[in-house]
Image (spheres, grey):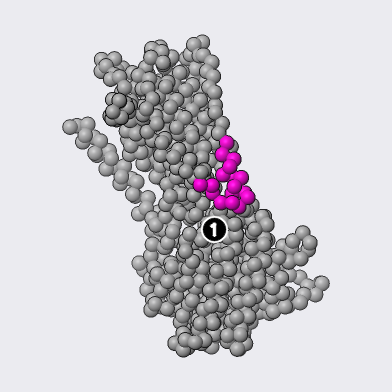
């Protein structure tokens, strides 16, 4: 009874510690109750057309190709003749959702969104779309609904393609952009015969949002230096030119349309984004039309300033001023005056409204995987010297383990040739995953045989979830685990490893007390991993965050299971109580957790914030995590399925 009470109290304390960081660090910075600020002058534009090329790097757009010609001739002509342009520096995290929120709502990432898996904002927020009279949006089902969800008055209309179209193995992801352009043309044509819609379209303060996801998808699948990505830029350029013609013709060339072309984030050379590298944060900004500066020819002796527009959130005040709507209440952006072409009076009034809007937030707000790796290195060095200090090196024997290398060339070759995922490879991958849970239970419970069966089953799964040389990690880890078992078993001079059986009950009289060596045995756990959608291409290529996340989580757990099975083996071979080892690991976890508690961040890049949370969550979850893993590894190591003559299965 005392043991149960001890366990429950300890569990309760750790749960409180686990939840505490979300109440201390991760509370929403957004405030409500501010008064919207209006500019008491007529705006220069009646409507705004916003193009967001998801994942477009600034250099990819502005840099000419190898022949010296522009990849985007239409946008280049806008820059040279009738628009204004620059390079904007987006804030971290450089991801699609926070990038669009910064563009359209004007504030940094809401750190409390961690509770929502960073997929949506946990509280309602204001945006240019919400302040507009009407907003029509076309594009991805992952982005558009969040701006319609919190909009008042049901005046934000979204048109999205099926989620299945966002396929990383697609032969041409630019079809996502083509879909948007075609839908806009069809919409404008249908409006001519719909008087109600036609009258809405001719009202002031309207916004048209075209979300172009093809570049981001092609960048992830083929990398941003690929032919697919660069050709997609040309397709977007042609589509923008066509859309401008459609809008100008529809509105009779009235000169009251403002156009903004930009991106939510960039992309690294290896096809990722989320951190703060310049390739991820530097994005293009081209604006033209009503109320915007026109191109100015520079003389050869003229000085110029090459500073970029700092912050994607500064575009929100710009778009609001162009069509005469209040700047979003939660916006922290500063109006970039250099982009406006209007009177000094208008600029002054706009600056004043921007300043008061930010001041209102201040008033309302004022009222209302140890971390330093060197430490692990020190510990490992000490463990490495231990055999020599203890004299065990005289007993050490050479172990030779034959590592099997499996090559999944067919899947990678098929995807490179844009032939999609082979059905046979997909079936084999899922069959391998499913069989890995019960195949070890068919083998002998003898220590060496059972461990070898477990390791081979898990390694097969890890291989089909690998994209390169990382596949060598489980075999090398397994070899290290066998060395560890052999050293620990010989250290206590017990029976031969081949004679130990997991299924045998340990005699309580033979269980020994804790020794100083057992602290060393508990000093283990240092694993890390990163997300790459290519890891699951053998299972599926259509974007599905739940299945992909589950597969990647299992990939992360495989090394842990290997280590836990080894730990179970050491406990059996050294005749030590599993509860004693568990208490040692618990104390080490608590010391690490206290250290990580003070390292939790609520600022910086998404990667920095997520990493600091992950460190704390992992060590605080260690108690429950180890308990669950110990149950799983106990079944994997000690249970056996016996198939009799009548094919009946039972646990031995």
Q: Quadrant of residue 215?
A: bottom right
The foreground one among 439 and 213 is: 439
- The x, y position of residue 589, in whole percent, is 38, 36
Return the x and y of residue 583 as percentages of the image width and height. 32, 30
Location of residue 417 in the rendering, given as x and y in whole percent from the top left corner? 63, 50
Whether residue 417 appears in magenta in the rendering, the answer is yes
Q: Is residue 415 above or below residue 209?
A: above
**Residue 373 rendering spot, x and y as whole percentages:** 52, 36
Residue 595, quarter of the rendered image: top left
Q: Magenta segment range?
A: 407-423
Q: In the figure, is residue 152 to the left or right of 66?
A: left
* Image point (49%, 37%), residue name: 462
The image shows residue 128, relative to residue 122, as above or below, that is: below
Q: Is residue 562 visible?
A: yes
Would you call the spot at circle 1 few (<14 residues within 10 Å), some (14-19), or many (20 or more)?
many
Q: Residue at x 56, y 39 (%)?
A: 408
Q: Which quarter of the figure is the C terminus placed in?
A: top left
Q: Residue furthest right?
A: 300
Left or right, residue 427 beside residue 251: left
Relative to the observer, which residue lies in front, 614 or 478? 478
Residue depicted at 44% across the width and 70% down the height:
147
Residue at (76% x, 70% y) in the render:
303
Disc 1 target residue:
94
- 306 shown above or below 459: below
Evaluate whether residue 564 shows in this view. no
**Magenta segment: does it hold 470?**
no
316 vs 389, nearest the viewer: 316
């Amino acid at each position: 009874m005392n043991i149960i009470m001890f366990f429950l109290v300890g569990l309760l304390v750790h749960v409180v510690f686990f939840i505490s960081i979300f109440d201390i660090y991760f509370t929403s910075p957004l405030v409500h109750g501010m008064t919207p600020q209006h500019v008491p002058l007529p705006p220069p534009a009646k409507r705004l057309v916003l193009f967001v090329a998801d994942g477009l790097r600034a250099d990819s757009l502005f840099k000419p190709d190898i022949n010296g010609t522009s990849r985007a001739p239409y946008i280049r002509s806008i820059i040279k003749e009738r628009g204004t342009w620059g390079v904007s520096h987006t804030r971290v995290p450089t991801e699609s959702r926070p990038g669009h929120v910064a563009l359209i709502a004007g504030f940094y990432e809401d750190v409390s969104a961690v509770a929502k898996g960073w997929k949506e904002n946990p509280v309602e927020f204001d945006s240019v779309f919400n302040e507009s009279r009407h907003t029509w949006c076309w594009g991805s089902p992952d982005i558009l609904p969040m701006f319609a969800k919190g909009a008042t008055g049901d005046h934000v209309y979204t048109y999205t393609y099926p989620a299945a179209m966002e396929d990383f193995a697609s032969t041409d992801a630019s079809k996502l952009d083509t879909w948007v352009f075609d839908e806009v043309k069809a919409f404008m044509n249908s409006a001519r015969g719909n008087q109600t819609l036609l009258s809405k379209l001719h009202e002031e303060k309207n916004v048209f949002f075209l979300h172009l996801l093809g570049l981001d998808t092609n960048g992830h699948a083929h990398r941003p230096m690929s032919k697919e990505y660069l050709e997609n830029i040309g397709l977007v350029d042609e589509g923008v030119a066509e859309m401008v013609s459609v809008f100008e013709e529809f509105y009779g060339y009235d000169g009251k349309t403002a156009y903004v072309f930009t991106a939510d984030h960039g992309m690294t050379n290896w096809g990722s984004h989320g951190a703060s590298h310049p390739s991820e944060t530097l994005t293009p900004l081209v604006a033209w039309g009503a109320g915007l500066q026109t191109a100015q020819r520079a003389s050869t002796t003229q000085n110029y300033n090459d500073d970029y527009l700092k912050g994607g959130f500064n575009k929100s005040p710009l778009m609001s001023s162009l069509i005469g709507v209040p700047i979003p209440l939660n916006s922290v952006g500063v109006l970039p005056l250099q982009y406006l072409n209007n009177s000094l009076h208008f600029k002054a009034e706009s600056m004043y409204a921007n300043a008061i809007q930010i001041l209102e937030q201040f008033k309302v707000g004022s009222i209302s995987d140890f971390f330093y790796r060197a430490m692990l290195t020190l510990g490992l060095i000490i463990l490495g010297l231990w055999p020599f200090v203890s004299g065990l090196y005289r007993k050490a024997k050479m172990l030779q383990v034959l590592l099997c290398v499996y090559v999944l060339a067919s899947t990678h070759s098929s995807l490179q040739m844009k032939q999609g995922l082979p059905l046979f490879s997909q079936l084999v991958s899922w069959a391998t995953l499913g069989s890995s849970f019960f195949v070890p239970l068919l083998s002998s419970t003898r220590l060496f045989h059972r461990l070898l069966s477990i390791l081979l089953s898990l390694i097969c799964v890890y291989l089909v979830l690998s994209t390169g040389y990382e596949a060598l990690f489980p075999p090398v880890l397994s070899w290290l685990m066998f060395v560890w078992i052999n050293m620990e078993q010989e250290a206590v001079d017990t029976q031969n490893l081949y004679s130990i059986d997991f299924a045998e009950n340990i005699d309580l009289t033979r269980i020994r007390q804790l020794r100083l060596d057992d602290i060393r045995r508990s000093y283990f756990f240092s694993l890390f991993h990163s997300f790459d959608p290519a890891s699951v291409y053998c299972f599926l290529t259509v974007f599905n965050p739940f299945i992909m996340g589950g597969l990647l989580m299992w990939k992360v757990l495989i090394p842990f299971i290997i280590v836990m099975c080894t730990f179970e083996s050491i406990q059996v071979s050294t005749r030590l109580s599993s509860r004693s080892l568990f208490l040692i690991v618990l104390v080490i976890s608590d010391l690490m957790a206290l250290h990580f508690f003070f390292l939790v961040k609520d600022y910086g890049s998404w990667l920095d914030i997520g990493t600091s949370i992950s460190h704390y969550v992992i060590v605080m979850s260690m108690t429950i995590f180890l308990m669950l893993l110990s149950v799983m590894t106990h079944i994997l190591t000690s249970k056996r399925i016996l198939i009799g003559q009548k094919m009946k299965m039972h646990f031995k």
